[in-house]
Amino acid sequence: MTLAPVATLPLLGMVTPLPGFPEFRDYVLVTADGDGRLFWLQSLDAGGPRFLVVPPARYFPDYTPVVPPAALADLGLDDVSDAQVFCLVTVPAEGPAAATANLRAPLVVNPANWRATQVVLSDGRHPIRRPLRR
């Protein structure tokens, strides 16, 4: 019997910890749906947090975050177009139909070195809670 090769998941090293989770710096990004619309950002630490994230371009094609140059430098990026961007999703008690994405504080990932950081945008034009469904 031949076993299929196991896909390796990239280890995301947080440049700075996610707010509220200072002890967790290592995560993996795991598909939650198989088609690239939903992902889990899963801590590698036992009992660590897991966050639902989405690539915003699939839900919000008009989303163009302005990432500060210092954050790009921390990630080893010259331009945000070289990054992978994800938004954290909140699913309230009302259920998935009321889910929102945080467009104000995207997770920015350099796919060349898998360094990541959450950036709080200062321009204020992107909401903290934007409905996933319009």
Image: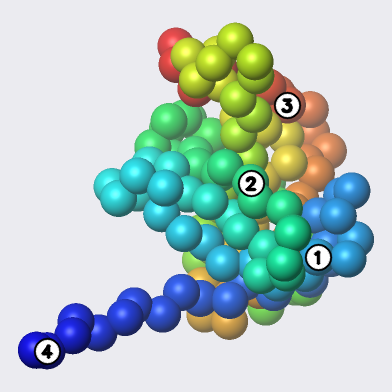
Q: Nearer the viewer, mark 4 or mark 3?
A: 4
Amino acid type of the residue that numbered disc 2 sits on in the rendered structure: Phe
The residue carrying mark 2 is: 51
Q: Nearer the viewer, mark 1 or mark 3?
A: 1
- Say whether marks 2 and 4 touch (CB < 8 Å): no
**Residue at the front extreme?**
1
Quick one: label 1, few (<14), some, or many (20+) residues within 10 Å?
Answer: some
Front-most of residues 29 and 75? 29
Q: Tell me where residue 115 appears, x and y as whole percent.
A: 66, 74
Q: Residue sitting at 52 percent across and 61 percent down?
A: 29
Q: Nearer the viewer, mark 2 or mark 4?
A: 4
Quick one: label 3, few (<14), some, or many (20+) residues within 10 Å?
Answer: some
- The image quadrant where one finds the C terminus is top left
Name the element at disc 3.
loop
Between the C-alphas of marks 1 and 3, the distance is 23 Å
**Residue at the bottom extreme?**
2
The residue carrying mark 3 is: 128
